[in-house]
Image (cartoon, rainbow, N blue to C red):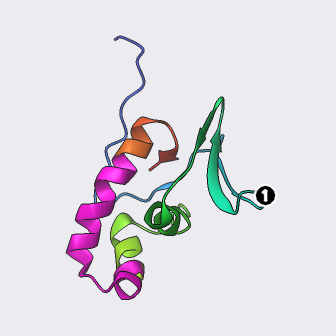
Amino acid sequence: MSGKPSRTVMAPASVPALARHVKMRHDKVRNRWVILAPERVFTPDAVAIAVLQLCDGKRSVEAIAVALEQTYNAPKERIIGDILPMLQDLADRGVVTA
């Protein structure tokens, strides 16, 4: 066994949440959202913000897509296809867990 942590793989049934050490804050001075992680700062775009605000550890990726269907006037399947790679990238960076 290598001792290397296992990779979180995001799927429609995954229930994402921000990792314990990660905070999402609104920077009032610059009027933008930032994700604060140890020794890193991310500046998410508007879509990422909408998704991350719904990553509460209770909703699945599919439920998040359903919640965003009306906002983005797109079918759930397309939204899942768009947000899964983003969530996977954030999971790989340790920002979200599932």
Residues 42 and 2: in front is 42
Residues 77 and 6: in front is 77
Establish if 23 lies above or below 64: above
Q: Is residue 23 left or right of residue 28?
A: left
Total of numbered circles in the picture?
1
Residue 5 found in image quarter? top left
Residue at coordinates 46% horizontally, 69% vertically from top-left?
59
Asked whether the viewer can see residue 22, the reply is no
Asked whether the viewer can see residue 67, the reply is yes
Residue at coordinates 36% horizontally, 57% vertically from top-left?
14
Residue 86, given in percent of the width and then of the height, sits at 36, 52
Residue at coordinates 42% horizontally, 81% vertically from top-left?
67
Mark 1 nearby-residue class (10 Å; few <14, some 14–19, many ≥20): few
User: Outermost residue, top direction?
Assistant: 2
Establish if 48 lies above or below 6: below
Residue 50, given in percent of the width and then of the height, sits at 50, 69
The quarter of the picture where the N terminus appears is top left
Segment tinted magenta in the rendering? 68-88
Secondary structure that dominates the magenta span: helix
Q: Which residue is mark 1?
A: 29
Asked if the magenta segment contains residue 32, the reply would be no
Residue 77, given in percent of the width and then of the height, sits at 21, 73
SS at badge 1: loop
Asked if the magenta segment contains residue 78, the reply would be yes
Residues 38 and 4: in front is 38
Q: Is residue 90 left or right of residue 53?
A: left
Residue 20, given in percent of the width and then of the height, sits at 64, 44
